[in-house]
Image (tube, grey):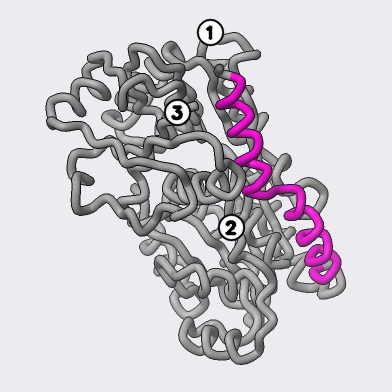
């Protein structure tokens, strides 16, 4: 069987979809020695120098498929011109909503979330129109659709007329490099570098409206006003959109001395952050899966997260669940864990156990089975 996979996001700083593609193809390489893979980027800027061959596993039977002309690339993805990609590829897996128009191949599309339907106010008008258009087109073309959670499946069925049997839930997982860091020298060096000595509360994720950071800041400010010894809050993540108000709110709440913004950090640094955090808090309003929660659990962090969308699926009974729209609940959960070290330790044990329910091998196995189902 010949399988095409969109690996465009490997050409950029790996977050979200990029991590999904990276771990999927690397685990497919370890599982599948029979099929032939055609890996293609859909951005012309990736051709030919920016496409990172070094990111691809050497033991995968693959070829990089190049569109010979810019017009062929744009026509296939943007304008719906049909193509027989790489000459009779059997299955094409589009890892995002911008799917190719195919002549003789079956299309599998991965939809990670539907925020542009559920909460359009979090996006620009242009992004909402773009995302809805390409999602509709992808759903119509797809033979099978992969979603990251039962919650996203429910959303997809609510917004599109589609047979439920067409949708397959395949969970994601924490990367293999997320585990409890126990080397004292590594921990000491990294903590000194990051400036995170002592106890701290951790948030990891993009700085954007749906992550609900303004509510977190307000809840945290209340804790600080009651107890000056409250652990500092460390925020790690890249700016997304509509995030500038966060810094203004920090200043308004007089939290500048209690909050540390780290920006993007390496995976090794992130592992140490998760492993040494006294509390991990993730009060997101909506997630398609919620990778930071699984990553934190894989490192043994005690977790507070939202009881909405996919997050209860991911966290199980291993986290304190809050209503993200109620600042009081975020405050109460933070206070409860701050004051109860025994509970924090109990949640650490539960976190590690819960994280073991997810693995990239399982993700790759179920995805490969779906490829085979298309034949």
Pointer 3 residue: 2
Residue 71 in view (yes/no): yes
Distance CA(mark 2)–CA(mark 1): 34 Å
320 horizontally vs 244: left or right: right
Q: At 78% from the left edge and 53% from the top edge, which residue is drawn?
A: 354
Compared to residue 255, the image places residue 118 above or below, namely above
- Which stretch appears magenta? 344-373
Which quadrant of the rendered structure holds the C terminus? top right
Mark 3, secondary structure of its residue: strand
Q: At 55% from the left edge and 53% from the top edge, which residue is drawn?
A: 215
Front residue of 188 and 54: 54
3 or 2: tag closer to the N-terminus: 3
Compared to residue 182, the image places residue 142 above or below, namely above
Of tags 1 and 3, which is closer to the observer?
A: 3
145 horizontally vs 244: left or right: right
Q: Position of residue 289 (x, y in %)?
A: 60, 41
Main secondary-structure element of the magenta-colored stretch: helix
Q: At 81% from the left edge and 63% from the top edge, which residue is drawn?
A: 347
Compared to residue 63, the image places residue 273 above or below, namely below
State the mark number for residue 175: 2
Distance CA(mark 1)–CA(mark 3): 30 Å
Pointer 1 residue: 161
Mark 1, secondary structure of its residue: loop
2 or 1: tag closer to the N-terminus: 1
| Residue 80 placement: quadrant | top left
Compared to residue 172, the image places residue 238 above or below, namely below
Q: At 22% from the left edge and 17% from the top edge, which residue is drawn?
A: 79
State the mark number for residue 328: none
Residue 286 in view (yes/no): no
Mark 2, secondary structure of its residue: loop
- Number of numbered discs overlaid on the protein picture: 3
Of tags 2 and 1, which is closer to the observer?
A: 2
């Amino acid at each position: 069987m010949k399988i095409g996979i969109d690996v465009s996001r490997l050409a950029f700083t790996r977050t979200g979809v990029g991590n999904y593609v990276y771990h999927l193809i690397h685990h497919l390489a370890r599982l599948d020695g029979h099929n032939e893979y055609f890996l293609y980027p859909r951005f012309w800027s990736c051709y030919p120098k920016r496409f990172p061959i070094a990111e691809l596993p050497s033991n995968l039977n693959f070829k990089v498929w190049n569109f010979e002309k810019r017009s062929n690339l744009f026509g296939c993805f943007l304008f719906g011109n049909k193509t027989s990609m790489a000459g009779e590829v059997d299955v094409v897996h589009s890892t995002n909503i911008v799917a190719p128009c195919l002549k003789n191949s079956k299309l599998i599309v991965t939809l990670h979330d539907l925020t542009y339907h559920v909460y359009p106010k979090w996006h620009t008008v242009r992004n909402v129109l773009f995302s809805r258009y390409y999602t509709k087109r992808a759903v119509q073309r797809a033979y099978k659709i992969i979603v990251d959670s039962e919650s996203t499946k429910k959303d997809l069925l609510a917004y599109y007329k589609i047979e439920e049997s067409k949708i397959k839930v395949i969970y994601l997982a924490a990367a293999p490099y997320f585990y409890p860091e126990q080397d004292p020298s590594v921990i000491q060096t990294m903590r000194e570098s990051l400036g995170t000595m002592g106890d701290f509360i951790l948030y990891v994720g993009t700085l954007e409206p749906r992550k609900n950071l303004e509510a977190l800041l307000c809840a945290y400010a209340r804790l600080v006003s009651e107890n000056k010894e409250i652990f500092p809050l460390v925020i790690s993540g890249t700016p997304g959109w509509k995030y500038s108000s966060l810094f203004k709110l920090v200043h308004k709440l007089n939290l500048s001395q209690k909050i540390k913004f780290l920006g993007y950090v390496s995976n090794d640094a992130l592992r140490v952050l998760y492993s040494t955090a006294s509390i991990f808090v993730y009060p997101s309003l909506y997630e398609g899966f919620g990778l930071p929660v699984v990553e934190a659990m894989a490192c043994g962090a005690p977790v507070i997260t939202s009881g909405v969308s996919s997050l209860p699926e991911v966290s199980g009974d291993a986290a304190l669940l809050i209503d993200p729209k109620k600042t009081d609940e975020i405050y109460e959960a933070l206070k409860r864990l701050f004051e109860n070290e025994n509970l924090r330790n109990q949640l650490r044990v539960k976190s590690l156990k819960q994280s073991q329910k997810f693995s990239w091998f399982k993700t790759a196995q179920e995805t490969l089975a779906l490829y085979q189902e298309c034949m």
